[in-house]
Image: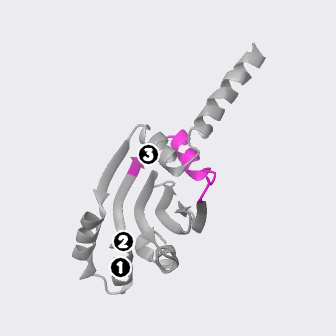
Amino acid sequence: MKKYFFTVIFALFTGLFASAQDLNSLMNEVAKSENAKREVGDGAAIVGRMKTFLEKDTTGMMARLLPVMQKIDSAMTVSIQSPDSVATELIKNYKLGVGDSIIKVTDKAPAYIRTIVHKEGDSTTEVFLLYVIDAPYNAGAIFKYSGKFNEADLREMATNKFMGN
């Protein structure tokens, strides 16, 4: 009986982690969690929202980020309030897939943030931000920005505070 129990547990965990082998699959898995919310937008909507805050930005950081944001073709967000432990573990323990690389990690309590880029050939086609924010806020999110980004764009995303850094 004990052997059967461990086999079932192993199969569950293997299936859970195997199903999130790329970032799009990870987003789909987290979106299935209770309290998860998925939003989709295009680049023009993001730039439009950004321009409303641009006037209030006294640091100049948003102005530097605007040219990068104008390269976004589409954006998707999966956010989750009070994520269950499965969603939190999926986000925190995501293993990089083919074409993925980490450009920034922030691990200062209560926030854990990874900025991951996905490249196809020589072009960066997607940028993902994976967030887990522990108590007292208890939230998580995955942001996906699709477009054609160059190395300067990635440096700006990795250092700009409006990108969660």
> What residue span does the magenta drawing correspond to?
78-99
Residue tagged by mark 1?
A: 67
Give the Cα separation between the discs numbered 2 and 1: 7 Å
- Toward the front, the furthest residue is 121
Is residue 75 at least partly visible in the picture? yes
Mark 3 packing: few (<14 Cα in 10 Å), some, or many (20+)?
A: some
Asked whether the beta carbons under mark 2 and mark 1 sit within 8 Å of each other, the answer is: yes
Residue in the picture at 40% in, 65% down: 147
- N-terminal-most mark, 3 or 2: 2
Q: Nearer the viewer, residue 85 or 121?
A: 121
Left or right? Give the position of 21 relative to 76: right
**Mark 1 belongs to which amino acid?**
Pro
**Residue 21 x %, y %:** 59, 45
Q: Is residue 38 above or below residue 70?
A: above
Residue in the picture at 41% in, 61% down: 146
**Mark 3 belongs to which amino acid?**
Ser
Is residue 137 at least partly visible in the picture? no
Residue tagged by mark 3?
A: 82
Residue in the picture at 56% in, 43% down: 20
**Mark 2 belongs to which amino acid?**
Lys
Dot 1 lies on which element?
helix
Residue tagged by mark 2?
A: 71
Asked whether the beta carbons under mark 1 and mark 3 sit within 8 Å of each other, the answer is: no
Dot 3 lies on which element?
loop
